[in-house]
Structures are given as C-alpha cells and as structure tokens.
Image (spheres, helix red, strand yellow):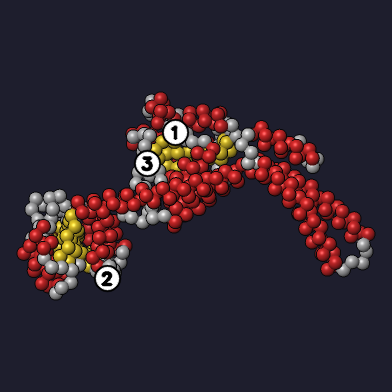
C-alpha cells in the first residue's frame, strides 16, 4: 500500500514520507497492527510504500490505511484517494516492477534498486522481515538483475548530460586520457563533466566569467585548472572536448577563436557540446575540418531515441517479471503444506530410528561399516517411500480454491495419522 509520482503530487508524498532515522521504529510499530506478521517500508522522492505479509487481508487493509494516514497533516480523504493497494500476486508483480525500474519516472534508472536494498536492510536489522518477505526480497533482487543483464533497459542514456558523453564516444571512440574544458557553471554541463571523468577523461579545466566560481567548480571536479572567459584563446587549442553552458547572449566560441584552436591541434578533432540557450558556439564553427558541434536539440534527439529503445526493452522486462511472479507464487502457495510435510518427515524418521535400533540390538557383532550401511539403507528407503506423497501434497498446494486445498491437506493428515492441525 502506498503512493507514488503517478497517484499523488509531491505535497501529498512528502506528508507520508518519514524522516530516515524514524523508519526502523515505523516498521517495528507496523508489526503491532492486528494481522501483520512482517513489514518493510520503501520511501524515495517518488514513492512511499508499505509492504506487509499478513493473516487477514481485509482487516490489515483497513488498519494499514488508517496507520499510514494518521497524523500526516493533510485531509485524510485526500490521502486515501491517492493510496493504491496491491494484493497477493499483484503485490509481488508490483514489487518486481518497481525494483526493475519499470514503474519509475524514468524507465531503466538504476537508483531505485539500491533504495529498495536499503529499505530491506533497515527492516531486516529491525527484525520485521521473516520467511515470506525475506524470500520475496531476495527474489526481487534476482528479478532486477535478470532485467538488467537480459535486456538493454538501462543501456541507453536518457539524460542530456549522459547523452553528451555518448556522442563524445562516437567522435573519439576512447575517452581515456583526453582533456575537457567546461565553459560556464551550468548544472547539466557540470553533470556532463562528471560523466566524462567517470569515462576516464584525464582532466577538466573550467573557464567562467568569475574566477572564484571557476576555482570552486574545478575543485569539485577533481582539482583541474581554472580560468576566466577572457583566457579562452590561451587554452582552447589544448583541450579535446568543450562543454559550454553560459548565459551569454552572444556566442563565446567565435569562428576566429575556433580556427586558431584548430591550427594549434594539427588535425586532432575538437568536440563541442553546447548546452546553452542561446547557443555558446557559433554554428559556423561546425564547418571547419576537425570541429564537431552538438547543441541541446541534438542531445534531446539522442535522449528521445534512447527512451524509445528503453520502452521497447521494457516489454522484454515485463515478460521476465511475469515468469518470476509465477515462480514465486508457486513457492508461496506451498507454504501452507510445509507443516504437514515436516510432520510426515518427522514421523517417518522416528519410525526409522526406532526400527533400526531394534534391528541393531538383535544383530550383535556388526562392524561399524555394516551399521553405517544399514543406516544408509533405511534412510534411503524412508526418503523414497515418502517422496511421492510429499510430491502429491505440493501439487495440491497449487489448487486455486482455498477450501479444496484445506480438504486435501486434512485428508492427507488423516491418512498418515498426523493429528489435527
């Protein structure tokens, strides 16, 4: 049960979002609700969700709704209207989709899986996850890994800053050892510079209208050099990649400036990523041999193309989720018969040990090797004798009608004299 960016605006989501240090107490308190056996809370900027394993779904639904909305500072009717509830198989499917980033604002973003792992760690440390949620969370991580490795859902850049890096790779093939220049202090340009550094760029030099800001940004990007914009003629020919993001009403990279830099570079390409509006690089610069320019529209086209790729890959991911939901539900449905299987196994083992002890008492003088052989023989016989009954019981556990499942289990217990349960 919860809200996300699709069902509630941020002013509603922030009312439900707990302070991080209070999450352990919240999941612990949730176990005090009637019928709740296990609990986990996922809280991000885009969603607040409570995941519980419970006895009686109807009672838990009402109690959980009241608990989530109590004292949140908003009209409870508005909160309830924004809440969604997924039960049983659909709850499993929802969690798998969230962890696989199929329910994210940006499909394929990787952060959500780490956030869910953090939520599970907190709940686990608080002791609020047990058999069902422990199995479910580990299966969730397995599903997310399958989606990442078997599809390209996270492989195509869908941010302008990362798209710039993709384009740079197309020009240079290998970015390791190249030098970048950041002109201006725009946020997207700074993010692009960070992505370039992550790809092995040797250094990032910063040029800005104010030297102080240039020095601060250079420190944040690993300690590169800092210059004023007036110094561009001195440094433009020494870099390979230029990211521009100033507020200048006229181009800061003129044809004259670029022509001089091209001569200095002696045939080595010069790549401009112009994220500014109005543009920082005069379009005429793109006509020079060895100069490549991509502006914000070019980057947006890359992003839109990659979004289409992700949406196509999302269809493959949905198929993986469907497969794994079926597998988990098979395991979940078998939980009802586990006590009966345990009782049958224990009874068979008790009979085996009793009869073996009686036999060994009569067969005096057996060597340790012979005794061990009889031990192996009896264990094998018992295991094979109860294998088919247990297999039958597990198959009946997948019966869709709860009353039929209970009847089969009760009959099984009577046949083997396992007592009432």
Residue nearest the observer in this picture, 394 or 114: 394
Mark toward the start of the polypeptide (1 vs 2)? 1
Estimate the x, y position of residue 77 in percent, counting from the top left: 41, 25
Please state if 58 lies on the left or on the right of 169 as rendered: right
Q: Considering the image in quadrants, where does the C terminus appear?
A: top right
10 Å crowding of disc 2: few (<14), some (14-19), many (20+): few
Q: Residue at x 33, y 55 (%)?
A: 156
Q: Which residue is drawn at 50% across and 53% down?
A: 142
Please state if 345 lies on the left or on the right of 175 as rendered: right
Please state if 116 lies on the left or on the right of 341 as rendered: left
Residue 39 against residue 195 in the figure, above or below:
above
Estimate the x, y position of residue 229 in percent, counting from the top left: 11, 60
Give me the disc on residue 177.
Answer: 2
Mark toward the start of the polypeptide (2 vs 3)? 3
Estimate the x, y position of residue 124 in percent, counting from the top left: 53, 47
Please state if 389 lies on the left or on the right of 184 as rendered: right
Q: Which residue is drawn at 51% across and 28% down?
A: 62
Give me the C-alpha separation between circle 3 and circle 1.
14 Å
Residue nearest the observer in this picture, 31 or 251: 251
Figure quadrant of residue 228: bottom left
Q: Does residue 225 appear in the picture of this structure? A: no
Figure quadrant of residue 202: bottom left
- Residue under label 1, please give it: 84
- Residue under label 3, please give it: 46
């Amino acid at each position: 049960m919860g809200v996300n960016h699709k069902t509630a605006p941020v002013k509603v989501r922030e009312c439900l979002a707990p302070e991080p240090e209070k999450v352990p107490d919240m999941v612990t308190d949730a176990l005090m609700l009637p019928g709740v056996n296990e609990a986990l809370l996922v809280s991000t900027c885009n969603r607040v969700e409570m995941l519980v394993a419970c006895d009686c779904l109807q009672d838990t639904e009402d109690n959980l709704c009241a608990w989530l909305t109590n004292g949140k500072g908003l009209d409870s009717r508005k909160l309830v209207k924004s809440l969604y509830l997924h039960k049983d198989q659909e709850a499993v499917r929802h969690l798998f989709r969230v962890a696989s980033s199929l329910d994210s604002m940006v499909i394929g973003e990787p952060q959500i899986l780490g956030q869910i792992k953090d939520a599970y760690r907190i709940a686990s440390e608080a002791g609020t996850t047990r058999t069902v949620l422990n199995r479910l969370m580990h299966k969730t991580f397995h599903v997310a890994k399958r989606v990442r490795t078997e599809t390209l859902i996270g492989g195509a850049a869908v941010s302008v800053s990362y798209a710039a890096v993709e384009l740079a790779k197309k020009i240079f093939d290998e970015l390791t050892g190249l030098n970048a220049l950041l002109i201006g202090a725009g946020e997207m340009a700074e993010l692009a510079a960070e992505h370039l550094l992550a790809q092995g760029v040797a250094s990032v030099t910063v040029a800005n209208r104010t030297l102080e800001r240039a020095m601060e940004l250079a420190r944040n990007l690993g300690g590169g050099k800092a210059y004023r914009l007036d110094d561009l003629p001195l440094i433009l020919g020494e870099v390979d990649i230029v990211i521009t993001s100033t507020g200048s009403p006229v181009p800061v990279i003129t044809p004259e400036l670029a022509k001089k830099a091209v001569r200095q570079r002696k045939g080595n390409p010069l790549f401009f990523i112009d994220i500014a509006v109005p543009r920082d690089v005069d379009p005429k610069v793109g006509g020079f041999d060895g100069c490549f320019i991509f502006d914000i529209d070019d980057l947006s086209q890359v992003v839109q193309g990659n979004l289409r790729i992700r949406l196509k890959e999302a269809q493959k991911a949905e198929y993986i989720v469907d497969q794994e939901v079926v597998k988990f539900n098979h395991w979940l449905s078998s939980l009802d018969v586990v006590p009966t299987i345990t009782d049958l196994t224990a009874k068979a083992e008790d009979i085996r040990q009793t009869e073996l002890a009686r036999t060994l008492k009569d067969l005096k003088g057996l060597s340790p090797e012979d005794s061990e052989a009889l031990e192996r023989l009896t264990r094998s016989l018992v295991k094979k004798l109860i294998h088919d009954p247990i297999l039958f019981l597990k198959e009946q556990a997948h019966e869709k009608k709860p009353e039929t499942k209970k009847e089969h289990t009760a009959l099984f217990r009577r046949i083997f004299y396992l007592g009432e349960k």
